[in-house]
């Protein structure tokens, strides 16, 4: 169970991200705030994480509203595009990452290269160059 000052520290730390400043805001001595803040930050790490998640969740509707305003009214198309991408990403609609594969042609036989070309192009419309034959 936390004291009122410890609770105030957790609140202040979640808002500022600064342990020393949060300790002072919670009523600890300015002379010892750096050390006390460090200690309290480590002691209440889990509570700080939970409170931070709670604060973030509380602000999601506001953030989405601002993103929507940027999408609808930004003068710059690049700002609009960035807002759209962020909005879709947060909605779980992030595009899939491109995965590049490479084939080591040097280690392939001529027949393997021909089969690879056919698989990439579909049925061959043209002759495979003679130097691969």
Image: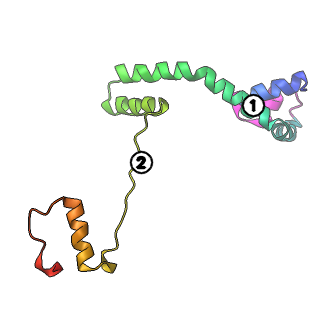
Callout 1–callout 2 Cβ contact below 8 Å? no
Task: Please check the rendered image and state whether residue 29 is part of the magenta-colored stretch, yes or no.
Answer: yes
Which of 30 and 71 lies nearest the eye of the viewer?
71
Decide which of 10, 114 is in the foreground and name it. Answer: 114
Disc 1 target residue? 13
User: Which of the marked residues, 1 or 2, is nearer the chain's N terminus?
Assistant: 1
- Residue 26 visible here: no
- Residue 17, image quadrant: top right
Badge 1 density bin: few <14, some 14–19, many ≥20, Cα 10 Å = many
Q: Secondary structure at mark 2?
A: loop
The picture places residue 36, in percent across and down from the top left corner, at: 87, 37
Taking depth in this image into account, of 115 and 49 the one nearest to the observer is 115
The residue drawn where x is 17% and y is 79% is 132
In the rendered image, which quarter is residue 45 located in? Answer: top right
128 vs 66, left or right, is: left
Q: Which residues are magenta?
A: 15-30
Please tell me whether residue 44 is drawn above or below residue 66 in the rendered image.
below
30 left or right of 122 in image: right
> Residue 9, how many percent across, how many down?
81, 28
Query: Residue at (42%, 21%) from the top-left corner?
Result: 68
Label 2: which residue?
97
Quick check: 130 left or right of 78? Answer: left
Would you say residue 31 is visible in this rendering? Answer: yes
Residue farthest along the left direction in this orientation:
126
Point out the image quarter for the N terminus: top right
Give how far across and how far down residue 47 sits, in percent.
79, 31
Q: Is residue 3 left or right of residue 21?
A: right
Between the C-alphas of marks 1 and 2, the distance is 36 Å
* Residue at left offset 66%, top offset 24%: 55
| x, y percent for residue 101 | 37, 62
In the rendered structure, find residue 94 and report the number of the disc placed on it: none
């Amino acid at each position: 169970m936390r004291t009122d000052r410890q609770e105030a520290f957790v609140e202040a730390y979640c808002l500022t991200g600064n342990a020393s400043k949060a300790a002072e805001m919670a009523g600890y001595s300015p002379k010892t705030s750096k050390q006390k803040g460090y200690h309290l930050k480590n002691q209440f790490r889990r509570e700080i994480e939970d409170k931070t998640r709670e604060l973030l969740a509380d602000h999601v509707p506001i953030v989405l509203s601002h993103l929507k305003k940027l999408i609808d009214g930004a003068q710059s198309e690049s700002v609009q595009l960035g807002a759209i991408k962020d909005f879709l990403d947060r909605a779980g609609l992030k595009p899939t990452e491109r995965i590049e594969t490479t084939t080591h042609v040097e280690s392939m036989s001529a027949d393997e290269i021909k089969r690879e070309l056919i698989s990439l192009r579909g049925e061959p419309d043209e002759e495979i160059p003679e130097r691969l034959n």
